[in-house]
């Protein structure tokens, strides 16, 4: 089975209020050493017989580093693995970190999919989130990507921000469909430990959106985007036909993927492993010529079944199911067709509770 390859680029211009991913601010001088290290790590896994058909640069802000560094990493992957001719190559991109010339460089390197971190089309919401761009720059960046030749562009939006109204969220969706990106990730704000938003919530400095508003925003998102030609193929993701993110589908289908860089997680179908969440420790291990894995776990059959359930239920196609249906789950939260069970829109709202009920029947 072809693998995916995830590469974590931790460098950022600034830290967003909601972000709990590993990132480093103000360490631009470390970029050359990090590029060298991630190339060395790739070589530690080299297998010319191993097929790779998706590559995903995540972060952090991958678009923050020079295009030449991304190109060097891609060349190393091509040297070490059997990269498919039609591989999907995604780069997470923040609008303030690119210009038309850099976007053209990305395309020339073989990057064929952009994931734009827009988050909102309202400047006051962008400021609240600590984003470094404004709404005008987000729109302009999308247009520059199209002009550069990108035919597969995704956008991220975040709902249920503190003080966000249903109308404000609807405005975001309307402005998005005016641009017609090929894919959308619409996330509901979560308060992760260690983030600025979580600290402010604990101190009573902000008021989280009420649950009913989160629900209404989520259900309105599904109705609106499906009405404008975007298929709801995963709990938070929508795409025009044929533009589903092939790399992320590997996660949800429990397929194998390689992982490179600080804090990156990999999976071989049974064993899961993850790298140091520390730039220094990562670089030190690479300097020693050892894989920078901080921990790993080998899943037993029951764990594999549970993960396949939890991940598969995130998608519209759901999972194969030949067991008894949990009696405590209302019929309007799921559908059953041809030996498969999947969640309805209302089921996605209660995803964790519904999955827990199904897990009880394993």
Image (cartoon, rainbow, N blue to C red):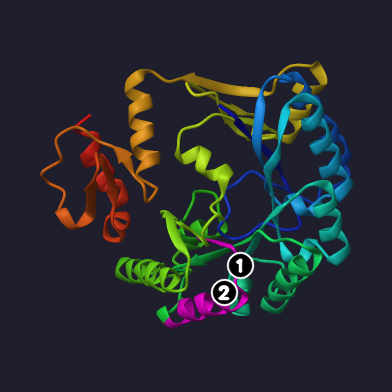
Q: Indicate the position of residue 138 as horizontal and vertical percent values.
A: 69, 72
Residue 79 vs residue 281: left or right? right
The reply to whether residue 66 is visible in this rendering is: no
Upstream in sequence: badge 2 or badge 1: 2
Q: Does the magenta stretch include residue 114?
A: no
Q: What residue is drawn where x is 69% and y is 23%?
A: 292
Q: Indicate the position of residue 171 as horizontal and vertical percent values.
A: 50, 81
Which portion, as a residue range, is magenta? 167-185
User: Up-down: is 135 above or below 284?
Assistant: below
User: Which one is in front, 110 or 285?
Assistant: 110
Q: Indicate the position of residue 172 as horizontal and vertical percent values.
A: 53, 76
The reply to whether residue 181 is visible in this rendering is: yes
Question: Which quadrant holds residue 179?
Answer: bottom right
Residue 73 vs residue 248: left or right? right
Q: What residue is drawn where x is 66% and y is 27%?
A: 51
Q: What residue is drawn where x is 55% and y is 58%?
A: 18
- Within 10 Å of disc 2 (Cα), the crowding (few <14, some 14-19, many 20+) is many
Which residue is identified by label 1? Answer: 181
Q: Residue 176 carries which label?
A: 2
User: Which one is in front, 205 or 335?
Assistant: 335
- Within 10 Å of disc 1 (Cα), the crowding (few <14, some 14-19, many 20+) is many
User: Which one is in front, 228 or 313?
Assistant: 228
Residue 276 vs residue 48: left or right? left
* Dominant secondary structure of the residues highlighted in magenta in the image: helix
User: Which one is in front, 223 or 185?
Assistant: 223
Q: How far apart are marks 2 and 1 (CA)?
A: 7 Å
* Label 1 element class: loop
* Label 2 element class: helix
């Amino acid at each position: 089975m072809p693998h995916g390859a995830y590469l974590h680029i931790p460098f950022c211009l600034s830290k967003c209020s909601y972000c709990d991913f590993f990132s480093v601010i103000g360490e631009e001088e470390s970029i050359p050493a990090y590029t060298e290290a991630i190339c060395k790590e790739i070589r530690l896994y080299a297998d010319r017989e191993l097929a790779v058909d998706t590559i995903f640069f995540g972060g952090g802000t991958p678009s923050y580093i020079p295009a030449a560094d991304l190109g060097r990493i891609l060349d190393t992957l091509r040297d070490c693995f059997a990269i498919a001719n039609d591989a999907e190559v995604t780069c997470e991109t923040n609008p303030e970190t690119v210009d038309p010339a850099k976007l053209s460089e990305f395309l020339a390197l073989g990057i064929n999919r952009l994931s734009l971190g827009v988050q909102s089309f309202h400047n006051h919401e962008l400021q609240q989130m600590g984003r470094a761009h404004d709404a005008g720059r987000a729109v302009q960046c999308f247009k520059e990507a199209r002009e550069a030749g990108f035919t597969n562009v995704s956008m991220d939006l975040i709902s249920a921000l503190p003080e966000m109204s249903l109308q404000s969220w609807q405005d975001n969706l309307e402005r998005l469909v005016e641009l017609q990106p090929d894919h959308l990730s619409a996330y509901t704000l979560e308060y992760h430990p260690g983030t600025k938003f979580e600290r402010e919530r604990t101190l009573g400095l902000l008021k989280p959106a009420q649950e009913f508003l989160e629900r209404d925003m989520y259900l309105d998102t599904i109705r609106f985007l499906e009405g404008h030609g975007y298929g709801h193929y995963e709990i938070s993701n929508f795409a025009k036909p044929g533009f589903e993110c092939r790399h992320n589908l590997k996660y949800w289908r429990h397929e194998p993927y390689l992982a490179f860089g600080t804090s990156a997680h990999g999976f071989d179908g049974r064993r899961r492993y993850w790298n140091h969440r520390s730039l220094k420790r990562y670089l030190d291990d690479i300097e020693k010529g050892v894989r920078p894995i901080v921990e790993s776990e080998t899943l037993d059959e029951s764990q594999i079944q549970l993960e396949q359930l939890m991940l598969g239920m995130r998608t519209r196609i759901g999972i194969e199911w030949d067991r008894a249906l949990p009696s405590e789950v209302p019929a309007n939260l799921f559908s059953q067709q041809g030996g498969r069970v999947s969640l309805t829109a209302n089921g996605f709202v209660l995803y964790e509770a519904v999955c827990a009920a199904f897990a009880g029947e394993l």
